[in-house]
Amino acid sequence: AVVGHDWSPWLGLGGGRGVSLVLGAGLVPSPLAAAGVLAGMVTGRLVRQSGLGTFLGLAALPFALRRPRGPGVLAGVTLVAPVLAKRLLGNDMRIPYSWRVLVGRLFGDRDDWLGARPAGGDA
């Protein structure tokens, strides 16, 4: 479901980020893990860094699912990996990749997070 949402064939392989799907899928096996993702999103929004807060919440999800009789780290990584891949790839494939663009996309979910110029040029 996350992959289908992130790279929808009806949207030309564009789409959303899949964070809401991960939140819902994490809610079933571990409401506490889902609360951690939500807390990261809300905290990030409050400090005006929602991309970073969401990243931290997503990064904590596999570890939160690593509880006794829980689905485990592999389940969390399976949920989070497509979301992080989508963040790295972005929707606009015309933007040239540089380390600043990739770091900005991964941690801030923005192409210009570290001052990179998303319209092209050397970053």
Image: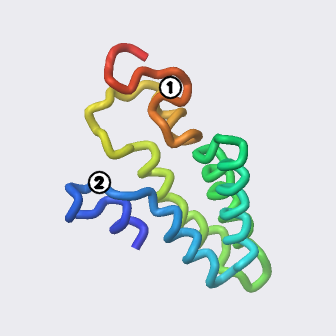
Residue at position x 33%, y 24% in the image: 119
Which residue, given by chain and number where applicable, does mark 1 sit on? 100
Question: Outermost residue toward the top?
Answer: 122
Q: Nearer the viewer, residue 117 or 123?
A: 117
* Distance (Cα) linking label 1 and label 2: 22 Å
Q: Quadrant of residue 69?
A: bottom right
> Height in image: 16 above or below 52?
below
Q: Position of residue 52 (x, y in %)?
A: 63, 44
The kind of secondary structure element at disc 2 is loop
> Height in image: 24 above or below 44?
below
Instruction: Look at the numbered discs 1 and 2 and tell me whether their residues touch, using CB distance below 8 Å.
Output: no
Q: Earlier in the sequence, mark 1 or mark 2?
A: 2
- Crowd rating for badge 2 (residues with CA inside 10 Å; few <14, some 14–19, many 20+): some
Q: Nearer the viewer, residue 80 or 116?
A: 116
Amino acid type, callout 2 = Gly
4 vs 104, left or right, is: left
The kind of secondary structure element at disc 1 is helix
Task: Give the quarter of the figure containing the N terminus.
Answer: bottom left
